[in-house]
Amino acid sequence: MVFALMGQNRIPAKGIAAMNNQGDFEIYDFDRHELGDTDILMEITYASICHSDIHHVKEEWGAEEYPMVPGHEMVGRVTKIGKNVTAFKVGDYAGVGCMINSCGTCKYCKAHMEQYCPKVVMTYHAHDPFHNNEITQGGYSSNMVVSQDFAIKIPKNAEMDKVAPLLCAGITTYSPINYVDVKKGDKVAVAGYGGLGHMAVQYMVARGANVTVFDITEEKRADALAMGAVKFVNVNNAEELKGLDNTMSFVISTIPANYDPNMYLKMLDLDGQFCIVGLPAMANMPVLSIDKFIWKGNRKVFGSQIGGIKETQEMVNYSVKHNIYPEVEKIPATPKAVEEAYENVLDGKVKFRYVIDMSTL
Amino acid sequence: MVFALMGQNRIPAKGIAAMNNQGDFEIYDFDRHELGDTDILMEITYASICHSDIHHVKEEWGAEEYPMVPGHEMVGRVTKIGKNVTAFKVGDYAGVGCMINSCGTCKYCKAHMEQYCPKVVMTYHAHDPFHNNEITQGGYSSNMVVSQDFAIKIPKNAEMDKVAPLLCAGITTYSPINYVDVKKGDKVAVAGYGGLGHMAVQYMVARGANVTVFDITEEKRADALAMGAVKFVNVNNAEELKGLDNTMSFVISTIPANYDPNMYLKMLDLDGQFCIVGLPAMANMPVLSIDKFIWKGNRKVFGSQIGGIKETQEMVNYSVKHNIYPEVEKIPATPKAVEEAYENVLDGKVKFRYVIDMSTL
């Protein structure tokens, strides 16, 4: 009975879905769970394309289910709220990132790091145990139903067409930079100058750090320097790599393809830290040989997964206040435009984030 | 001319040398460089056997030169001092560990971390640029000539037959435990309960930590518990490994053979640290896959190499004061005894450190 009643109030949605692991997209009609008492319904205005969407669509991180509506970077207008919602009003702007729920009671949730909760519900490609285990569908769609606890308030003065990428690319880089507390004058580096990398550069430049950028796309050299980096290193050029060992206090790798992490470990100075946030396909995952850790004693390697909801809100507020936004390229909400965008991301042609204008769906 | 004069004053020594990478030892007569103005000459009383001696003798970390006198854990009596020596008197006890010189001027030397100096001179299997590039020979020998700056003062009340292993096994574990500042009540673990591991257990028990020990040798279970560990886990027993994920604030791995480091990374709790000090043969060096870092975000992995001279002195003083010593098994100074000891180390039969009584040479 309960299921039937719930079914009656399900909310129709339209999305752009991957139909298979070849990356063929189609317009897809589906529905979302009914509006709970503490949920908000938002009409999505912009959703952006993260490299990890491609990993999921192509099953590079494990088996998936189709049709799959990707997208874990989205912003929109609140159009309806549950009766107990206090954090949002109709007409407010909200953002949703990589997760939409968690248990709320474990030590990770209590520490505001819901992303490590064993029951965390990812925004898409997941089953939601809090809603009859329904499959979750992401932001390349007309709307979203989400608990107010997992929606981020977007200040009204934000540049709305550039906000979406903050919800993953922004927090994924902001969080570890905040965690290691990068300071004015620190010698730091960003490996991989794409969607995540160009956010990392901005956050560290804003803190006054001395930022070096590593990438393989020569065309990005001028962008990096214009963004405030003191140096751009083309890692395909051995000459440019000389003299960098033992010089960095912090390196963040956003690289989503195979690469040599040992090279960056070597660049760390005593007590330096190497943070990994970019995740390549499982089939060609780089490895760190443990002897490298000993030769470079007292240098640390760690990973970081997005950031908790509280910190994500802090990051959005900080970004808007400091005018830190991704560089975006808008595309229409059509399957063909998404397919072309994926090709360009893989070819390193995008500078730096594709944002789908969902109003054109 | 200078070379000829130096040659005249070289100091005769007798050692137990590996003659090849098969581990065949022989008595070997050689000489050491003349006593410099700030050098001390010490008569070695005890030298101990570290697993890394075996890696070197067998060329498991790269090409070596023979005859090779191993040994970087030694203690002895000062029998002669250079005219400008102020730190030692004849009759004092001194210890020598893994290194005997460094540049003294680089940032690592200035930070009292001579082990990371680009010009550090290892106690054996190295060429000494400060002495005409002569090959260095270690502690399985009658005497040692060393700068007073790289000799450790051994308190007169120390148990002299147990002091030698402190100079490598002691400092290698003491330094990272000190670096991460293990505290009373911390849940910590030691992976590999051998020469290094049993020192790590003692240092962490002395700090009041809650220590779990991982090993594959069932016969060591009782020793670990007697030494103050709260738990012994036989890693060959899958049942015992259950329930350990996300529980440890610090894990130190002393394992000198192939193993799965990802298993220990998974055991770390948020902000936990995994320190690698054990170094297997290059041919089967374990690797950490970078995706493991992301799944276990905010957990850190680092390596640590022995410790600087200042900290080594502090460790010896601390160990003697707190009565922390290795468990030792004495063997005579004969090639046959050394060969047998190596076999037993490889078979996991030693509890926990062989000490060669050099007075029997």
Image (cartoon, coloured by chain):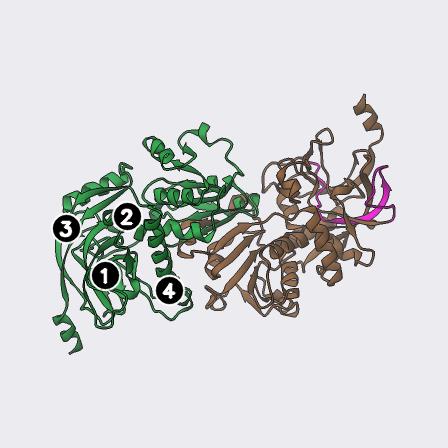
Chain colours: A green, B brown
Front-most of A333 and A309?
Answer: A309
Amino acid of disc 3:
Ser
Write down the chain letter for disc 2.
A
Q: Position of residue A261 (x, y in %)?
A: 44, 43
* Residues drawn in magenta: B66-91
Q: Which residue has dot 4 on it?
A: A117
- The residue closer to the viewer here, A100 or B134, is A100
Circle 2 sits on which residue? A50
Q: What residue do we see at 42% from left, 65% from top?
A: A111
Q: Which comes sooner in the sequence, label 1 or label 3?
A: 1
Q: Earlier in the sequence, mark 4 or mark 3?
A: 4
Local crowd at mark 3 within 10 Å, few (<14), some, or many (≥20)? few
Does the rendering let one see residue A59?
A: no
In the image, is B243 to the left or to the right of B218?
A: left
Distance (Cα) linking label 1 and label 2: 17 Å
The residue where tag 3 is placed is A359
A348 vs A291, nearest the viewer: A348
Q: The residue tagged with tag 3: helix, strand or loop?
A: helix
